[in-house]
Image (tube, helix red, strand yellow):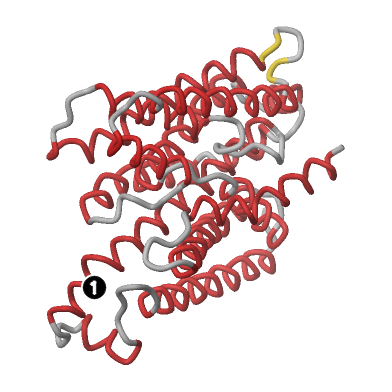
Amino acid sequence: MIHPSIIKKQRIFLFGLLALILITIIVSIGLGYSSVSYNRIIPTILGQGTFKEEFVLFFIRLPRILITLLAGMALAVSGSILQGITRNDLADPGVIGINSGAGVAIAVFFLYFPIEPGSFIYLLPAVAFIGALITALLLYLFSYSKQSGLQPIRLILIGVGFSMALSGTMVLLISSSEPEKVDFIAKWLAGNIWGTDWPFIWALLPWLIILIPFTLYKANRLNLLNLSEPTAIGVGVAIEKERLVLLLTAVALAAAAVSVTGGIAFIGLMAPHIAKALVGHRHQLFIPIAILIGGWLLLLADTIGRNLVDPEGIAAGIITALIGAPYFIYLLLKNN
């Protein structure tokens, strides 16, 4: 039974975060190399803008804003799941190599397979999922012990090693490739938001529509997995089955997100932590908060990055790394 005061607190934070996201969206629309004046945003939305204003708003700004929001939300949920099933607050799809695994699969697909323009966008999340899944299964295999089960600290250490090895593989893959393809992969590695058209949104959205409600449905299972293994088994949880199903969910969410945003790290680390600090450690309470925080963090990072240097800007992945890397070190020292 969750106390009504905690539910009320959660709702206050939800409404506050929604307001913060709305404000950031408005600021993002009005800033940049191509922008719409703040006093023209509502008339343009209502169909009373000029051709330039409508083009900038509906074909440049809004798709990019929605992509960053959706990808940030997916990464936040993925991080929440990984931290729950490993009982380790340092787990993040970018830190433990899942994003890098997705990146290698995308690089191989982009460099060596014939690309059909019509299907490329929709194949990317599936290709990224295959690469991330193989990486996650190898991580699970190397981190699992028959005597003690999944070892959270070992998972993080092996994951960091996997991430470095896979990043090296990416560099090796692009070292002898065509310059224009190298440029795409380099931008992906930096976490440059490249999928900024409406079809990318339609490719990403189904994954979130299915997997986020599924995660919320499994919230109580995640609560039980955070307990000791004997306790979880005692209340009837099939630990390995639940972990595997939830791991697949986390991998799918992370892969779908990075397939259109590039190698974004630390969103899945920071968002759950901030949410837990606000409303506690019950997954049904903090995951909805983490979803909004993740979306807002990536939107904010992209808004800041693209306005620091004209016209290309700085990749959102670099901005999140500048914030997230010190936070990761802080958590590492705190846990030790």
State whether residue 101 is above or below residue 83: above
Instruction: Locate residue 119, reporting x and y percent.
Output: 16, 36
Residue located at (52% from left, 29% from top): 167
Q: In the displayed structure, does residue 320 sit left or right of residue 48?
A: right
Instruction: Locate residue 141, reporting x and y percent.
Output: 59, 13
Instruction: Locate residue 23, reporting x and y percent.
Output: 46, 78
Residue that badge 1 annotates: 56
Q: Quadrant of the C terminus?
A: top right
Q: Nearer the viewer, residue 117 or 238?
A: 117
Residue located at (40% from left, 26% from top): 175
Q: In the displayed structure, does residue 25 sit left or right of residue 3?
A: left
Please give the count of numbered marks on the rendered protein.
1
Residue located at (79% from left, 48% from top): 330
Q: Residues within 10 Å of mark 1 (few under 14, many from 20)?
A: some
Which secondary structure, mark 1? helix
Res 225 quadrant in image = top right
Looking at the rendered structure, the kind of residue marked 1 is Val
Q: Nearer the viewer, residue 206 or 45?
A: 45
Instruction: Locate residue 58, reporting x and y percent.
Output: 22, 69
